[in-house]
Image: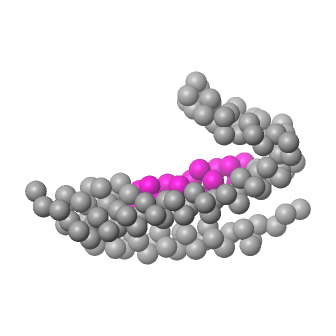
Protein backbone atom coordinates (compact mmCIF):
# COMPACT_ATOMS: atom_id res chain seq x y z
CA UNK A 1 0.00 0.00 0.00
CA UNK A 2 1.38 3.40 -0.97
CA UNK A 3 0.86 6.82 0.52
CA UNK A 4 -0.68 9.43 -1.76
CA UNK A 5 0.98 12.79 -0.98
CA UNK A 6 -1.42 15.00 -3.02
CA UNK A 7 -4.40 13.48 -1.21
CA UNK A 8 -2.69 14.20 2.12
CA UNK A 9 -2.25 17.85 1.13
CA UNK A 10 -5.91 18.00 0.07
CA UNK A 11 -6.86 16.44 3.41
CA UNK A 12 -5.00 19.17 5.31
CA UNK A 13 -6.54 21.82 3.07
CA UNK A 14 -10.08 20.51 3.54
CA UNK A 15 -9.61 20.33 7.31
CA UNK A 16 -8.45 23.96 7.32
CA UNK A 17 -11.41 24.91 5.13
CA UNK A 18 -13.77 23.16 7.57
CA UNK A 19 -12.30 25.22 10.42
CA UNK A 20 -12.71 28.36 8.30
CA UNK A 21 -16.35 27.46 7.62
CA UNK A 22 -17.00 27.07 11.34
CA UNK A 23 -15.72 30.58 11.98
CA UNK A 24 -17.33 32.09 8.91
CA UNK A 25 -20.72 30.57 9.64
CA UNK A 26 -20.80 32.50 12.89
CA UNK A 27 -22.66 35.35 11.20
CA UNK A 28 -25.63 33.01 10.85
CA UNK A 29 -25.73 32.36 14.58
CA UNK A 30 -25.54 36.10 15.17
CA UNK A 31 -28.53 36.61 12.87
CA UNK A 32 -30.44 33.84 14.67
CA UNK A 33 -29.67 35.50 18.00
CA UNK A 34 -31.07 38.76 16.67
CA UNK A 35 -34.19 37.02 15.34
CA UNK A 36 -34.76 35.13 18.60
CA UNK A 37 -33.91 37.90 21.04
CA UNK A 38 -33.09 36.45 24.46
CA UNK A 39 -33.93 32.88 23.48
CA UNK A 40 -30.66 32.31 21.61
CA UNK A 41 -28.97 29.89 24.01
CA UNK A 42 -31.54 27.13 23.56
CA UNK A 43 -30.99 26.44 19.83
CA UNK A 44 -27.85 24.29 20.02
CA UNK A 45 -29.00 22.34 23.07
CA UNK A 46 -32.44 21.84 21.52
CA UNK A 47 -30.85 20.53 18.32
CA UNK A 48 -28.70 18.04 20.24
CA UNK A 49 -31.62 16.87 22.35
CA UNK A 50 -33.98 16.59 19.39
CA UNK A 51 -31.53 14.55 17.34
CA UNK A 52 -30.62 12.35 20.30
CA UNK A 53 -34.15 11.67 21.52
CA UNK A 54 -36.46 12.00 18.53
CA UNK A 55 -34.04 11.76 15.58
CA UNK A 56 -35.80 14.76 14.08
CA UNK A 57 -35.36 18.53 14.19
CA UNK A 58 -39.11 19.18 14.12
CA UNK A 59 -39.15 20.50 17.74
CA UNK A 60 -36.50 23.06 16.79
CA UNK A 61 -38.61 24.30 13.88
CA UNK A 62 -41.63 24.54 16.20
CA UNK A 63 -39.49 26.57 18.62
CA UNK A 64 -38.39 28.87 15.78
CA UNK A 65 -42.04 29.32 14.72
CA UNK A 66 -43.00 30.30 18.24
CA UNK A 67 -40.11 32.58 19.20
CA UNK A 68 -38.56 34.10 16.06
CA UNK A 69 -39.54 37.50 14.75
CA UNK A 70 -39.32 36.26 11.16
CA UNK A 71 -39.95 32.50 11.18
CA UNK A 72 -39.16 31.95 7.51
CA UNK A 73 -35.80 33.70 7.70
CA UNK A 74 -34.90 31.91 10.95
CA UNK A 75 -35.64 28.50 9.43
CA UNK A 76 -33.55 29.28 6.36
CA UNK A 77 -30.61 30.45 8.46
CA UNK A 78 -30.84 27.40 10.71
CA UNK A 79 -30.86 24.96 7.81
CA UNK A 80 -28.15 26.79 5.86
CA UNK A 81 -25.94 26.89 8.98
CA UNK A 82 -25.91 23.11 9.28
CA UNK A 83 -25.71 22.48 5.54
CA UNK A 84 -22.70 24.79 5.23
CA UNK A 85 -20.49 22.22 6.97
CA UNK A 86 -21.28 19.41 4.55
CA UNK A 87 -19.14 20.35 1.46
CA UNK A 88 -15.84 20.55 3.36
CA UNK A 89 -16.71 17.38 5.26
CA UNK A 90 -17.23 15.58 1.95
CA UNK A 91 -13.79 16.82 0.87
CA UNK A 92 -12.24 15.46 4.06
CA UNK A 93 -13.87 12.06 3.54
CA UNK A 94 -12.81 11.91 -0.12
CA UNK A 95 -9.27 12.82 0.89
CA UNK A 96 -9.13 10.07 3.50
CA UNK A 97 -10.19 7.55 0.87
CA UNK A 98 -7.76 9.17 -1.58
CA UNK A 99 -4.84 8.60 0.77
CA UNK A 100 -4.76 4.98 -0.31
CA UNK A 101 -5.45 5.37 -4.02
CA UNK A 102 -4.42 7.77 -6.77
CA UNK A 103 -7.72 7.37 -8.60
CA UNK A 104 -9.30 10.26 -6.68
CA UNK A 105 -6.56 12.85 -7.33
CA UNK A 106 -8.38 14.29 -10.33
CA UNK A 107 -11.69 14.43 -8.45
CA UNK A 108 -10.02 16.05 -5.42
CA UNK A 109 -8.46 18.78 -7.52
CA UNK A 110 -11.76 19.61 -9.22
CA UNK A 111 -13.70 19.44 -5.97
CA UNK A 112 -11.25 21.93 -4.48
CA UNK A 113 -12.43 24.58 -6.96
CA UNK A 114 -16.09 23.75 -6.34
CA UNK A 115 -15.46 24.15 -2.62
CA UNK A 116 -13.66 27.43 -3.24
CA UNK A 117 -16.77 28.79 -4.99
CA UNK A 118 -18.93 27.62 -2.07
CA UNK A 119 -16.62 29.40 0.39
CA UNK A 120 -16.87 32.61 -1.62
CA UNK A 121 -20.68 32.41 -1.48
CA UNK A 122 -20.48 31.83 2.27
CA UNK A 123 -18.12 34.77 2.73
CA UNK A 124 -20.23 37.14 0.61
CA UNK A 125 -23.62 36.07 1.96
CA UNK A 126 -23.54 38.33 5.06
CA UNK A 127 -23.28 41.31 2.72
CA UNK A 128 -26.44 40.13 0.97
CA UNK A 129 -28.33 39.39 4.19
CA UNK A 130 -30.18 42.55 5.20
CA UNK A 131 -31.22 43.12 8.77
CA UNK A 132 -34.73 44.45 9.10
**Spot occupied by residue 37 in the image (x, y as percentages of width and height):** 86, 46
Residue depicted at 66% across the width and 40% down the height? 44
Where residue 74 sits in the image (x, y, percent)?
76, 50
Left or right: residue 7 versus residue 36 is left
Residue at left offset 63%, top offset 53%: 81
Of residue 31 and residue 58, the one placed in the foreground of this image is 31
Residue 103 appears anywhere in the view? no
Q: From this viewpoint, is residue 17 visible?
A: yes
Residue at point 49% right, 59% down?
18
Name the quadrant containing residue 26. bottom right
Indicate yes or no whether the magenta region holds residue 80. yes
Which of 74/20 is in front? 20
Identity of the residue furthest to the left in this view: 1
Q: Residue at x 53, y 55 (%)?
A: 85
How does the figure colour the protein chain or chains? one colour
Q: Main secondary structure of the magenta part?
A: helix
Circle count: 0
Q: Is residue 29 above or below residue 107?
A: above
Image quadrant occupied by the C terminus: bottom right
| Residue 66 horizontal side relative to residue 101, left or right | right
Percent of width and height locating residue 69: 87, 48
x and y, in percent, of residue 35 in the image? 83, 50
Please report the bounds of the magenta region as a residue range: 75-91
For residue 43, above or below residue 106? above
User: Could you say which quadrant of the image residue 126 lies in?
Assistant: bottom right
Quadrant (top left/top right/bottom left/bottom right) for the N terminus: bottom left
Q: Does the magenta stretch include residue 57?
A: no
Residue 102, image quadrant: bottom left
- The extreme top residue here reads 53
Q: Is residue 125 left or right of residue 99?
A: right
Amino acid sequence: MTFNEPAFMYLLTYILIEVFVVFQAGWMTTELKILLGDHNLKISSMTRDALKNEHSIKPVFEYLNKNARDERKAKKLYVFYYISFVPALIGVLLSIVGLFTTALNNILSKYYFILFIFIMVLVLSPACCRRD
